[in-house]
């Protein structure tokens, strides 16, 4: 018996496959940033000429299939339970579907300008509200797919990630609305596309100018990074002698980095366990290195002070009478569910500069980074621990915090990268943590002068503007007017 697919069903399958492929490679563990600018276009074009059920199916299925590229990472690497993984991906697919259906409904009512803005406004608003409640903060935001697009990344200094998500989705929305109007309202189509592209061009011009500005004279500091992923060093060393031996080995690497001119050395998080009252024994190993070599050291340990356990960065300053510390604020479930979150920040003075300390997942949250920016931090020292496969997907998220709040970042991760980036998001130096045996080390120069940004001053102002845009776009649904308009005429003019 012959099996035939109707032309509309065939078109829907093609739309689903195209968007899914673009999302798979544009949002994956090593995303190719241009793809996400085009990924929504097939679905948006299809939805304007399909029933709402067909549009919803195409949107939801395509986005979900594309996001399956991170299923292995979530379920097998991070250990997220099956149904929780399913809920995460379905939730993101639902957000995309709702945004597509809202834009479609407005477009068919003739409110083309509202349709243009509703799609990015809805998705951005959902991302922002989710960020406020999620234990993962901004983790997984579409904005992170654009870390390789440096000119566009500079927008984060004004709007944070929310402006990036909005403009990233404004482009496909403009293309879809413009193509829908091209036959019935060509001038309006030109206006929609030209205005949207004009805004994006202005953002890229701003980004180019910001990237062209040189760092302040005399602001460079030489930093050292070290990590080991071999011989059991990728695990947390047991308390007592094993931790002290490992710290001694790391200390020798710190001395070598100091001999190359490093003024501060950053090591990964959770190198070993330090149990009170014997923490001083482990501290003595690193403090001696700091005193004799004249280098500041930031090293991560699991600090146990019964009954509490902390993911802690120990800070060793040359000649310091006591060791200072920083406790990680944001834990990674389920691996760190037994650890107590910290509540304070740690600042180091280096001449006229200020350095801050955070740990790994802390850099997924904009609020903590802005607090450090307000403290005057020009450089963040970040012990970290990644899972190899996410060395780009998660390891580079911290780069955006530097652009937003105006500081450079020195991030040393086991199972990831040793990375130094500046307050423009440029990776100044980077090497895989398993590049060498038994230790991988790196020395680089980075500016440590804080750059004042609008996002640092005003915070999530653009997210609230986006929510206001969304509410305004929905006004046509509350107006008394004739039924749906399919030819693009009778625009309500909503924005």
Image (cartoon, rainbow, N blue to C red):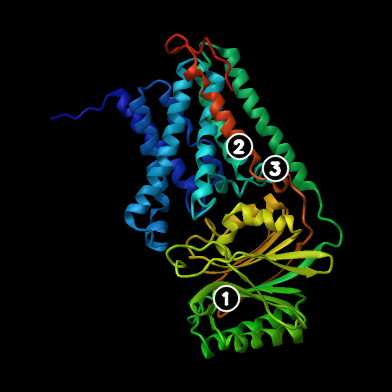
Task: Give SS at disc 1.
Answer: loop
Dividing the image into 4 quarters, which one contains the C terminus? Answer: top right
Answer above or below: position of 31 versus 3: below
Residue 408 found in image quarter: bottom right
Q: Can residue 426 be seen in this view?
A: no
What residue would you read off at disc 2? 464
Task: Give SS at disc 2.
Answer: helix
C-alpha distance separating marks 2 and 1: 47 Å
| First in sequence: mark 3 vs mark 2 | 3
Q: Residue at x 77, y 81 (%)?
A: 294
Q: Residue at x 84, y 56 (%)?
A: 216
Q: Which mark is residue 158?
A: 3
In the visual, does 298 lie left or right of 453? Answer: left
What residue would you read off at disc 1? 436
Q: Position of residue 50 (x, y in %)?
A: 37, 22
> Contact, CB < 8 Å: mark 1 with mark 3?
no
Answer above or below: position of 371 versus 26: below
Please state which of the two labelled residues, at mark 2 or mark 1, is closer to the viewer: 2
Q: Residue at x 44, y 13 (%)?
A: 486
| First in sequence: mark 2 vs mark 1 | 1
Q: Position of residue 40 (x, y in %)?
A: 48, 34
């Amino acid at each position: 018996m012959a099996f035939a697919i109707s032309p509309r069903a065939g078109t829907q399958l093609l739309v689903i496959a195209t968007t899914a492929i673009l999302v798979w490679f544009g949002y994956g563990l090593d995303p190719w940033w241009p793809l996400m600018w085009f990924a929504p276009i097939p679905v948006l074009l299809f939805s304007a000429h399909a029933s709402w059920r067909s549009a919803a199916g195409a949107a939801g299925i395509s986005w979900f299939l594309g996001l399956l590229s991170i299923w292995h990472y979530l379920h097998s690497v991070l250990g997220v339970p099956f149904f929780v993984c399913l809920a995460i991906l379905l939730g993101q697919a639902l957000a995309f579907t709702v945004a597509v259906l809202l834009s479609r409904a407005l477009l068919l009512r003739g409110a083309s300008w509202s349709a243009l803005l509703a799609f990015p406004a809805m998705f951005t608003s959902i991302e922002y509200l989710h960020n406020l409640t999620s234990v993962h903060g901004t983790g997984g935001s579409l904005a992170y797919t654009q870390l390789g697009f440096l000119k566009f990344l500079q927008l984060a200094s004004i709007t944070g990630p929310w402006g990036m998500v909005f403009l990233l989705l404004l482009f496909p929305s403009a293309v879809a609305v413009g193509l829908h109007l091209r036959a019935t309202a060509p001038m309006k189509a030109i206006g929609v596309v030209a205005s949207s592209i004009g805004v994006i061009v202005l953002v890229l011009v701003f980004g180019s100018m910001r990237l062209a500005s040189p760092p302040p004279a005399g602001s460079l500091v030489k930093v050292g990074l070290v990590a080991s992923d071999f011989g059991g060093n990728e695990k947390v060393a047991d308390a007592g002698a094993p931790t002290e031996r490992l710290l001694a080995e790391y200390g020798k690497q710190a001395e070598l980095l100091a001999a190359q001119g490093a003024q501060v050395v950053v090591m990964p998080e959770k190198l070993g366990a330090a149990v009170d009252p014997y923490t001083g024994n482990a501290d003595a190993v690193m403090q001696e290195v700091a005193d004799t070599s004249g280098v500041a050291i930031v090293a991560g340990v699991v600090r146990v002070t019964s009954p509490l356990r902390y993911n802690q960065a120990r800070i060793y300053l040359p000649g310091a009478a006591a060791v200072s510390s920083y406790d990680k604020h944001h834990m990674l479930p389920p691996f760190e569910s037994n650890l107590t979150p910290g509540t304070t920040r740690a600042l180091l003075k280096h001449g006229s500069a200020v350095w801050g300390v955070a740990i790994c997942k802390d850099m997924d949250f904009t609020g903590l980074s802005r607090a450090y920016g307000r403290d005057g931090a020009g450089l963040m020292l970040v012990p970290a621990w990644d899972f190899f496969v996410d060395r780009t997907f998660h390891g580079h998220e911290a780069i955006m915090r530097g652009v937003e709040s105006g500081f450079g970042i020195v991030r040393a991760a086991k199972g990831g990268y040793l990375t130094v980036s500046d307050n423009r998001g440029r990776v100044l130096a980077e090497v895989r943590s398993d590049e060498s045996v038994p230790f991988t080390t790196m020395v680089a120069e980075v500016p440590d002068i804080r750059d004042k940004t609008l996002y640092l001053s005003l915070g999530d102002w653009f997210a609230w503007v986006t929510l206001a845009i969304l509410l305004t776009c929905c006004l046509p649904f509350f107006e008394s007017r004739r039924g749906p308009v399919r030819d693009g005429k009778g625009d309500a003019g909503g924005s």
